[in-house]
Image (cartoon, rainbow, N blue to C red):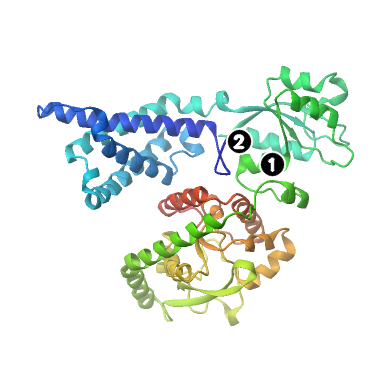
Amino acid sequence: MVRLFKHYVPYAVLLLGVVDAVLLLVSAELGWVIRAHQIGMMVDPMVTRLPQLVAFVAALQVALIAVGAYGVASFLSLRFAAARLAVAILLGVAFLSIVFFLVPPLALWRSNLAYATLIAATLLVVVRALLGRTLGGDMFKRRIVVLGAGHRAARIATLAAQPGANVVVAGFVAMGEANPTVSGAVPRDEIPNLAGFVVDHNASEVVLALEERRNALPLKDLLRVKTTGVTVSDISTFLERETGRIDLHSVSPSWLIFSDGFASGRMLSSVFKRAFDVTASALLLLLTLPVILIAAVAIKLESAGPAFYRQRRVGLYNQCFEIPKLRSMRQDAEVAGQAVWAEKDDPRITRIGRFIRKVRIDELPQTWSVLKGEMSFVGPRPERPQFVGQLEQQLPYYAERHMVKPGITGWAQINYPYGASIEDARHKLEYDLYYAKNYSPFLDLLILLQTLRVVLWPAGAR
């Protein structure tokens, strides 16, 4: 994987993104040239229309990212990839139309745009048909050797066996575990030279998956492995990179303390984030006010009670605040104000409520909290005080998620369905900790773009 602005991007995804950018540029240029020849116009050097071509590439590339066209499924299913490409192209063209209206010098002729779009759609599908399986195959996966044969090593084996995994396990080395669970692991005593074993298996990384590290680290072996140029990682670092979350089953306080992340030098990023929040929230409130009002009227017509309500949540540094929301449940959904987890197909949700939840319209009033500075657009979802007390007792490191300003959307929201239990909260906490540890404007931008995918293809909304 490549680490861009503290976020990990698989090699295959990065390569496909570069190939797509080149193909989009070629498509835009071919669309221009074809139309120029049709009308008998002389074709000037490409550099004279570079801004228009770059605008075309940028708009469609952003749309591809937003709809999830670089997800694992795109490498495994051509049908899935083609469907996402179709949506991305439609969104990209719609966005280009707005850009062309606002910035006329960047505009392509409609005929140029039509030709470029058709060529781009064809080339993108062809490339995925030809390279999809290759990019998702073992050629672009890292080969690793796992030290350990217990439950932790078995977790790595399960992860590597999943479709779209970025690693191949070249071998397991049993380190004297009392009850090994991985079959086929080679006992350490049978390996004369561990560094040679790693090199012979063509591995580029060794992952420590020991059940007990106290007085069990093979330091001399690891030093020799390291000096051969092979990366040495512990299981917590490995799982963070491969899954995009902090694994609560393997992480320790010392790892959180000594690993990189949670940087305090974020002043410039924080200023940029706040400036974006103020500008975007004011603009979004202005643009979506008609939608909010229509939804409010529909709620009032369907069920008795107010269309809006305020709910107390826990924010930055455990400070409580109230967020405004459109009501999506019956007025008597919570007896005596007692907080209750949402359920799948929750009977308390009204018909209008189910719709506005799926398309996230019920969250729009929260942009007022963003404008006030109590929330950000991107961050961990603020939880209710009743649940926070319960979760802090049952989940380690839960309080650490409150060291980041809460948000309307977040890394957990785009990677995990709606949480409605302690186990769901644990999974979402793992993603929230990853965000808090690896925050950057790049990750914020990625989350904002990918939120469109969640809106278009709601998964588990309750």
Q: Residue furthest left?
A: 40
Is 93 in front, or is 256?
256
Q: Position of residue 453 (x, y in %)?
A: 43, 49
Question: Where 165 sits versus 37, above or below?
Answer: below
Q: How many marks?
A: 2
Residue marked by disc 2: 162
Q: Position of residue 97 (x, y in %)?
A: 25, 48
Q: Are marks 1 and 2 in contact (CB under 8 Å)?
A: no
Question: Where 270 sits versus 36, above or below?
Answer: below
Is 444 in front, or is 84?
444
Residue occupying the point 65% across, 37% down: 159
Q: Position of residue 187 (x, y in %)?
A: 84, 25
Mark closest to the chain's N terminus, 1 or 2 = 2
Is 231 in front, or is 241?
231
User: Which amino acid does the dot numbered 1 rest on?
Assistant: Thr
> Residue 453, can we see it?
yes
Residue marked by disc 1: 237
- 412 displayed left or right of 119: right
Disc 2 crowd, CA 10 A, few/some/many (<14, 14-19, 20+) = few
Residue occupying the point 43% across, 76% down: 308
Distance from label 1 to label 2 (Cα)? 19 Å
- 221 displayed left or right of 61: right
Quarter where residue 291 is shown: bottom left
Residue occupying the point 50% across, 24% down: 134
Disc 1 crowd, CA 10 A, few/some/many (<14, 14-19, 20+) = some
